[in-house]
Image (tube, rainbow, N blue to C red):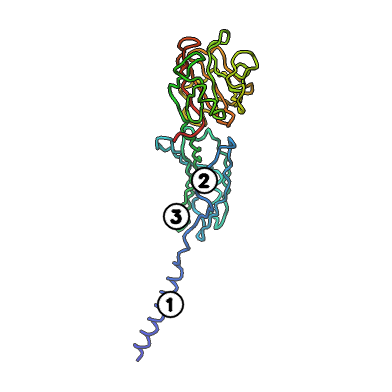
Amino acid sequence: MKKMRLLTVLFAVAGMIFLNSCGGDDQHAAPTISISKTSWELDFSNDTAVQVLFTADVNAEGEVETFSITETKIDQNGGQTSAAYDASTTSSFKGETSKKYTFDKTFYASDFTQYKEYDYKFSVTDKDGQSYSVTVKITKKAEATSPDATEYSTVLMGAQSNANVGSFYDVESNTVYTLSDANAHQADVDFIYYYGSTNTATIAAPNDETVNGQSGDFTWTQDWTTQNATAFYKLTGVDFASIQTTADVDAALEGQNSPLSKVPQLAVGDVVGFTTAAGTNGVFKVTDISGTSDGTITIDVKTNVAAN
């Protein structure tokens, strides 16, 4: 009986030691980092600089051993460069159980010339050796793509004495009319070509005085009820070949504030901007001039109407 009682006491003591031992080894909850927004797409369409501001909430029940931020820059070819970010501040987190980190950085459009993405990896390890990390990705919002411009190549127009090729051009439909046909399409005609003794190769708007009878030259549109007021701009320093999109066409006319109702003395290679009465912006280049009053002019045309 004494032996039985002694064994019972020993088991009881061993059980208490076991329970106390288990209770002393309880591990703390794993650390966490909370960031409300982990993907930023910066829009530089209206500003050259954009601020990225957010808070990282760091929690470690078992106390922070290390807290760090790694900045990784990803270039346009996918290459990566990594380095510690704000190490002097993050070192102050050691021993804390709850602390906030404020990320505040201004990005410039030029920052995304070499690099296409910036990643910030936030990492925490507690004194129990448990770790957690979260990455914030920052990219540049893709610029809106302008549609291709409508292009018309080798538009042939005849001068006033050319019996075979019309002198009246409708930009919107890319149609050249003879005088008789143009009378029935007054509202559609944007250009008129003639070769004068002084003005030589000239493209005029239907409302220009040299074609509507006011100057004593031609009276083609004198009786028209619609004389479209196309505005022309003689352009310099514009590379016609580089104009590819509707935005390019509009850009070629930016800053032009002295509209002409005609462009006289045209020569091969000249580049002319225009805005039709209907509001279509365009640019044409003279590619050939043949003959005089019975000759022709050939132009290539690009407009800010999106190509089909």
* Above/below status of 135 relative to 247: below
- Residue type of the residue flagged with mark 3: Ser
Query: Closer to the camera, 277 or 249?
Result: 277
Q: CA distance from mark 1 to mark 2?
A: 55 Å
From the image, which quarter does the C terminus lie in? top left
Residue drawn at x 47%, y 43% is 119
| x and y, in percent, of residue 78 in the image | 40, 37
Location of mark 2 (residue): 40
Q: How many marks?
A: 3
Element type at mark 1: helix
* Mark before the other along the chain sequence, 3 or 2: 2
Element type at mark 2: strand
Location of mark 3 (residue): 131
From the image, which quarter does the N terminus lie in? bottom left
Location of mark 1 (residue): 16
Q: In this view of the protein, can residue 232 be seen by the observer? A: no
Residue drawn at x 44%, y 17% is 164
Q: Residue furthest top?
A: 197
